[in-house]
Amino acid sequence: MLHARQGLLVHLTHIENMQADNLWGKERKARNPGRNDGRRQSPNYFLAIQITEEEIIQKVKEIQDIILDKERNLSHAMIDIPTLHLTLGVYYLGDRASVLQAAESLNRFHDKLKVSDFAPPSFTVSTLGNFNHKVVFASFADDQGLKDLNTLARDVKKSLEDDGLFTTDDKFNPHITICKMSRDMPRLRRLGIKRIEPSHYEEKKYTYFGKQTAGGIQLCSMVEPRSESGYYHIEHEIKF
């Protein structure tokens, strides 16, 4: 009888613990509804540093032209030059209130930078890389500028997280996209083009593109019409 009572007590305690965990999970979700929603929804906003240095822009054009000389069918896979940027994080913002919340969070982050010894990162763009031969990009030199950029990306991500806004992709891999097949994948597949051949750009693999100093952080929309300049719609921006 004693063993039976002890077994019943353990079972009831287990149920109570499960109920408590479930209640805690619901309370946590209620306090931060955007976390789970943001992670399962496709992103519609992103934080960006715009590429403005003319030397870098011209070198990207040169790489695109070289690739197109080898394979004209990749023309629609080329990134539009006016949109060149570095992505710090991508987000799903489900309503206007979430967008305003992100803007306010950026402002608070900016206020913290103003009272610190912050200096905008200046990073060196050099060499070409690829993601599974489906994306060609310009990468950054492993120097102090890259370290500063990584710190900035980490800190702004943490600032938004503190306000309940979570990126849909935790990985930060700084690069400037030059060409990506997903922009024209159905047509390229029909043409039998399965990848961007490294031989198309091998001669320029170690290109020095130039140096870019971050001018600020932009909250850009993936869905709103682009601006007259051809760049993304900027919902909010903090300038350094």
Image (tube, rainbow, N blue to C red):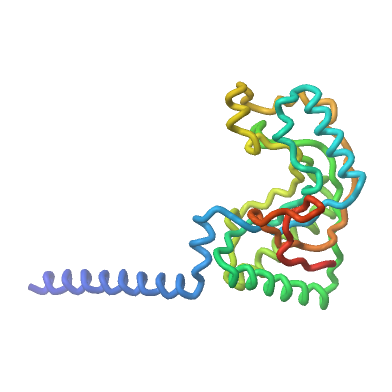
Front-lying residue, 32 or 154: 32
Point out the image quarter for the C terminus.
Answer: bottom right
Residue 230 at x, y percent in the picture: 78, 50
Residue 123 at x, y percent in the picture: 85, 52
User: Residue sitting at 16 percent across and 71 percent down?
Assistant: 8
Front-lying residue, 179 or 36: 179
Q: Residue furthest left?
A: 1
In which image quadrant can residue 103 be found? bottom right
User: Residue sitting at 66 percent across and 57 percent down?
Assistant: 224
Residue 84 at x, y percent in the picture: 79, 48
Q: Residue furthest right?
A: 55
Number of callouts: 0
Side of 88 where 55 appears, left or right: right
User: Residue sitting at 61 percent across and 72 percent down?
Assistant: 162
User: Residue sitting at 13 percent across and 70 percent down?
Assistant: 3
Side of 188 where 122 appears, left or right: right
Point out the image quarter for the N terminus.
Answer: bottom left
Side of 155 where 192 appears, left or right: left
Answer above or below: position of 173 versus 95: above
Front-lying residue, 154 or 106: 106
Side of 22 where 185 appears, left or right: right
